[in-house]
Structures are given as structure tokens and as C-alpha cells.
Amino acid sequence: MSAAILSVGDELMLGQTQDTNAKWLASRFAQHGVLVGEIRIVLDDVVATESAIRELAARYDIIVMTGGLGPTEDDLTREALRRAMDVSEPLEVDPQALADLDRWFLDRGRPMTVNNKVQALRPKGASCLKNVLGTAPGLFANIGAARIWCLPGPPREMEPMFDAQVAVHLPTVAMSTAAVHSFGQGESFLAQQLGSLMLRDRNPLIGTTASGSIVSARIRGVQDAAKAESMERAMQEIEKLWAPYAYGRDQETLAGALGKLLISRSERLSLAESCTGGLAGSLVTAQSGSSEWFAGGAITYANGAKMDLLHVPHDLLSQHGAVSAPVALAMARGCAALLKTEWAASITGIAGPNGGSESKPVGEVFIGICGPRFEAVRRFHYPGDRASIRDRSAKTALALVRFAILGQDAFAAPFIWEWSK
Amino acid sequence: MSAAILSVGDELMLGQTQDTNAKWLASRFAQHGVLVGEIRIVLDDVVATESAIRELAARYDIIVMTGGLGPTEDDLTREALRRAMDVSEPLEVDPQALADLDRWFLDRGRPMTVNNKVQALRPKGASCLKNVLGTAPGLFANIGAARIWCLPGPPREMEPMFDAQVAVHLPTVAMSTAAVHSFGQGESFLAQQLGSLMLRDRNPLIGTTASGSIVSARIRGVQDAAKAESMERAMQEIEKLWAPYAYGRDQETLAGALGKLLISRSERLSLAESCTGGLAGSLVTAQSGSSEWFAGGAITYANGAKMDLLHVPHDLLSQHGAVSAPVALAMARGCAALLKTEWAASITGIAGPNGGSESKPVGEVFIGICGPRFEAVRRFHYPGDRASIRDRSAKTALALVRFAILGQDAFAAPFIWEWSK
């Protein structure tokens, strides 16, 4: 079975938006053992879209297309599909799709616009696919031997529609994939640790990827009982080689892994954030059930807030500055006391692009950790822009609490960023 | 001038890596007034790559290709280009490229491997492009009327090579693009407001996109003095039609727009977050310079934190529950007092997937706003998963402060989500 992916949208061709749908779909196809042969992206242009559909339909068994199903003038997938199907009649209303649209607006107490009605149209001979999360139904059609599914562009509508309505037509002999995630070391160092595990003729096959300073080992193999065991063995081996940096598998997050540890000890965490301004708390509370182990935190962006909320002494701030080890420690202590938690972490630094100086450059961040019989402050110097400095700061704070609980002297380990005691 | 982008790599087709090069290149082309007609991604396969080069060369004036120039077995761009050029002789060594490679390894005191020597090969009739940041030289060739540049895959090598060696061949008459962003209404409603502005034969051309509940109008036109004026006129027209939901242009964010308003009034904001757990603060502090208008906030995830930090009365919590209008109001008031700010917003709700009940379902969120001579609490019921409920809650809190400052009765406007007084 051969497959291609077609994405439609001016915003993708103008470089305004990243086409994340194609990547997601390619990964889903891979899980079903189908290697995508081609990904194409075209403009919101009916001729370009029609010709791409025709060419791909002549070459591939399956085409999944996303975008261009919205209610507006520049949503041209319905019309392009009609032309590629050589249907001469104009688009026709799908009664079920129209009824579903009516109900959608009725349920929400909103009037349906004329534009929205357009979404119930389809070429003669095509069928509509139910979309329970949005107003745009999908489309399915045969062109020659090829089967074509058109799905809406928004990922939260597209993804469940693919899983429920397209994936069922893919082979069930599945390729299984798994991942082990780590934080705190660079990709080349971690790849070196894996050694011969990364050889290209192995099954399961293991590779590494890095994203947002999380380095993951990705494992894939053809699935059968024997292979399932070797997948498990490979994961355990990676976790051993990557200790203490490996924190979880598959969908697990750094915050989730920390939460598990805290729950097992019936302890709770609080956070005092300056330059991250709530980002660490946001990572924690993105986890459902985090109320079990997270009490809350203080976003103390201004110096006044550091004094008023966390009782950081004024003298400390004027003597050392807000971005300093003593202030980080006082923030963590104040936070643990304020929120009555066993553990607290604090983050204060210069995220840039402004506010740096020779003695305190952009990227300098102090992270304080305060726990039962344990206190520490570490200084980091992160490269990159404001977003990446903030992201790494927030994740490092969570990682350091995890290391402290594990009793790992990970401060002494060769951390990927500079620090000093 | 027409252009296409071709990316090569198995990792892109397995969904393991996002093709960020194509987006970057598309955006660069757009800046030069060249609209990319097609983006294609193919496997590390010499036949597939050759045929993609042939097809694109027959249709476009310029093709920029990335990837497949490394030193290993699966780097096949050199060979694919030779075939597409109909060159029968084997690849030949480029003396200058080989000398550059020699120097690269000499400078680093490392021996050059046999593999690396392969990188100095090129098809007869093609030329090599200098790469000062890596070992892979680029390639340039003519196929018929088309010009083809092959650049290495790593962005930090590819990007400067494009700017120095490809962009100089692009027109200096630029296409200009712009965007107007809005929050608080659905895409179909907003598109309807635009009416004839969205016709596909207009110049500048206007389309809408939605991402993370931000709906944007994207505008593009060929740039000259007259058109620059019509771009500006189009943006102003959109902003008028989308008032009060339109908050900014181009790179501007909702938080940034709110910040501008607050700075102009010398007022500051603080945030009290329960279910968003720091996400709203994180959106605010993602803005450089937000310390001018943002004091900080309280992440009061646990009830204890609501009482300890924000002095929410225990009675209120036990009588109405943490997710209620009275508690939201008390949180906002407590926050403004604690952080001594003119404005405060509070967020308390059920982000799910657990914790919902019949009377307080998942997605129910109360947002409180407290400002000079102004107080309000609104109840929202958001659809979607935990991430999207949290995202909309955080953005709504910022939007409601903005509406309140503007004196817009946007509470009474047909907000996209349910609410009641």
C-alpha cells in the first residue's frame, strides 16, 4: 500500500504557518507500516489543488489531504476535488452533513451563517465524513484506483477524524514505535552513550531526536510477540544508559514524571517564578491530576512582588540584585513557607533580549531548590532566544527537583549548560 | 518568477522530524515577492528525488532543494541531480570544494574520512557552493530554463547559504504580506464580516486562518508605493470590521496589545490563576518588557493557596466551591490588593478530563476582572480538551481586561463561547 499527503493553504506557502499536519499524518502512517512516498503542499488555488490531486491519485493508493474545507471563499478543496473527479455537475448538498451542521449551531444557540452552509456541499459521488469537533465535514472519494480522504486543517479536528475514519482502512500489521525521553544532556552525548544500539540494520531500529531540549530515543520495529519483548528490552537498556536523565516513555512528560515521584512520597511542590512568569507552573498544571502534588506558586516578576509575596528581604535585593543566588534561595524558602509544601523551586534570570549586562548577561538564570534536609542554588547560562531560555529554565527547575528527590548528584554530572556552585 | 521547494529525507516522511526548512525558505521567498507554488518532500531515494527534480524543473523557474548532501550512504542528492540533468558521466571531483574540505579538517585538526571526500563530488556542468559552516558544499545547476540550488539540510548551514548565494538572484521588487489578528469570535463569523474583501481576485488578496483560537486575516500584495497604501487601507478596514476583537498586526500578540494599553495608562496587571496554573502569566511574560505593566501573580491551584495567598474566605470556598463566581471575584480582588495593581484577572475552572460533575462540567471556567471602578465575573463553557480549555481561559482573561479598558461592552457581544451573567 502506497500513500501520499497533500496539504493546502496559502499560509503554508508564505512561510507564515508550519505544516504540522503532514508530520503528524506521516507518523501515523508509519505506525501502520505504511511509508509515505510523497508530501506535497500547494496554494489555496483551485487549479493547483486539482492538478496535485490528479497527479497523486495516479501514483498512490491512498491520499490524505488537509485544509481548504472551511466556510470561506479561499476554501477550495470541495471544488478542486470535484474537478479532479471529472464531475461536471456543480457541488451538491449532503443532507446528513447539513443536518449535522444545523444541529451543531442549534446546540450552541448560534445562528448558522450562509458561509457555513457551504460546508455541507460535496461533489457528486463523494461522501461526507462526520466531524464531531468542528463545522467542516471531511470528504471521501475514489479517483481511479486511488482512495482520497480530505480532512479539515485544524489538528484537533483532523487528528481524531483520521484515527476514527481513515486509520481503520490501513493495514493492521502494525509497526510499533516507542520513545524514551530525557532532559539535561545534549543529543550527541546521549547518542554516543547508545553505541551499537543505534546501528541502522538493527530491529528494532533506534534513533534520537531533540525538541525543546528534550532528547528522545525513538524505537521502531515490526510488531509481533517476540519483537514486543525486544522493544521492552531496548527501552530498559536506553533508560539505564541515560540515567538519571531519562525520565519517561512515550507520552510521559518531565512534569508528569516528577509528579509520580512526589505522589509516591506524599510530598508537594510549589514554584516561585520570576523570568519564567508562570511557565513552570503551566508545565506542571498541564498534567491532569497535578493538584495531588502541586499546591501553587508565586509569579514574582516585579521586585515588589518578591518582597510582598515571598518575603525576600529588601536588603538582599538591593545588595545582590534580583538575579542572584541569595535571592533565588530566599525565593524558594519563602515559597515553601507560603504554600506549606515540602519542596519548592525558584527561578530568577535574564531572559532577554534586553536587560543583560556584562556581569549579568542575557541567559543567566539562578534556580533554587528547597526540600526536606536539602537546599541548593545553581547558576546556568543558557544560549538562545527569550523563548528557549524560559523553556529551559522552567524544565531545569523541574529536573533539579527530580534529581534531588532521586538523590542523584546530577549537579555534579556534566550538565549541558554552564553552571557553578 | 515562479519557485518551488524540495526537501529530501526519510525522517521527514516517517513523521520523526518537522520540515522547518521549507517554511523558512517560503517565508524568505515571500519577502522577495516570489510566491512559492509548491513544496514537495520525498524520501532518501534516488529515483523519487530525480523524478521530483525533473517535474519541478519543467514547471518552475527556481527550485531550492535541501538535504541529502551529507557524507553517508543515504545522501543521494548529488546522484539524483546528475540523473535529472541527463549527465551520463559519473560524478566528478570539484577541485575547489575538495581544497575547502581539506582546509576544514586541517583547521580542526581532524582527519578527513573517505566518506567526507564524497562531498566534493558534483555532476559535470553543475557548480559547488561554498559552505563555511559545515562540510557539505551546496550545488547549483541549470535544467532547461530552470535554475536549481541544492543546499545542506541543517538550518544553521542552509540559511546563511540561501541568503548569501541564492537570494541575490531573486527580484528586489518585493511582495508584502501582513496580518491582522483577533480573539473572541469564530472564523466563519469574522470571515462573513469581511464580505467582499475576501474575493479571490482582489489585490491585495485577503484570507483568514485560525490557530489556537486566534483568528487572523492574512493580506498579501505586490509591493509598490500605491499597493503599500492599499495594504494599509485593507488592514484598517479589517480592524474596523473586526472591532473590538482585532487586537494587533503581524507579530503582535494579545498580551502585547494589552501591555501597550496598560503602558499608555501607566497601569499594571496581576493575575490569579487556578486551572491555568501559570499559563496566563507565561503568555504575558513571553513579551519582552512586560515588567513595565505586569507585577506578578498567584498560582493558587489548591484551595489552601487561595486562602493563604489571596485571602479568599474559607466560607466562600465551602459554600460555593472553588469553581464559582464569588470565588473568582474574591481571587481577583485579593490579587489586586496583594500585588498592588490597578487591574487583576482571575481564572478558576475545570480543565478536565477529570473533576467535572453534572452541575460543574468539564470546560466550565469563571473569569473575574477587577479594575478601577470596574468589576465583573463571567462564566464560560469551553469545548475541547484540557490544553485547549486552558489556552482559551488564559487568552480570554487577557482579552476581557483589554475589553474592559477599551470600555467595550464585549461581554454583551456575541462571544464565541457560552456565558451568562
Image: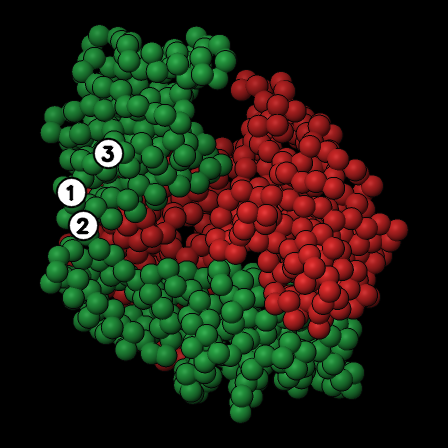
Chain colours: A red, B green
Circle 2 chain: B
Question: Looking at the image, can residue A28 be seen?
Answer: yes
Find numbered disc 3 in the image and state the secondary structure of the residue it sits on: helix
Find numbered disc 1 in the image and state the secondary structure of the residue it sits on: loop
The furthest residue to the bottom: B373
Label 1 or label 3, whichever comes before in sequence order: 3
Q: Are marks 3 and 2 in contact (CB under 8 Å)?
A: no
Amino acid type of disc 2? Ala
Task: For marks 1 and 3, give the CA distance.
Answer: 11 Å
Residue A376 disc label: none
Left or right of A301 on screen, residue A2: left
Q: Position of residue B374 (x, y in %)?
A: 53, 89
Residue where numbered disc 3 is placed: B166
Residue where numbered disc 1 is placed: B171
| Quadrant into which the N terminus of chain A falls | top left
Q: Position of residue A307 (x, y in %)?
A: 71, 69
Circle 1 chain: B
Between B278 and B296, the residue placed more toward the observer is B296
Find numbered disc 2 in the image and state the secondary structure of the residue it sits on: loop
Left or right of B371 on screen, residue B136: left
What is the number of callouts on the image? 3
Q: Are marks 2 and 1 in contact (CB under 8 Å)?
A: yes
Between A43 and A281, the residue placed more toward the observer is A281
Q: Residues within 10 Å of mark 1 (few under 14, many from 20)?
A: some
Asked if badge 1 and badge 3 are on a common chain, one would say yes
Circle 3 chain: B
User: At 28% from the left edge and 23% from the top edge, which residue is drawn?
Assistant: B129
Amino acid type of disc 1? Pro
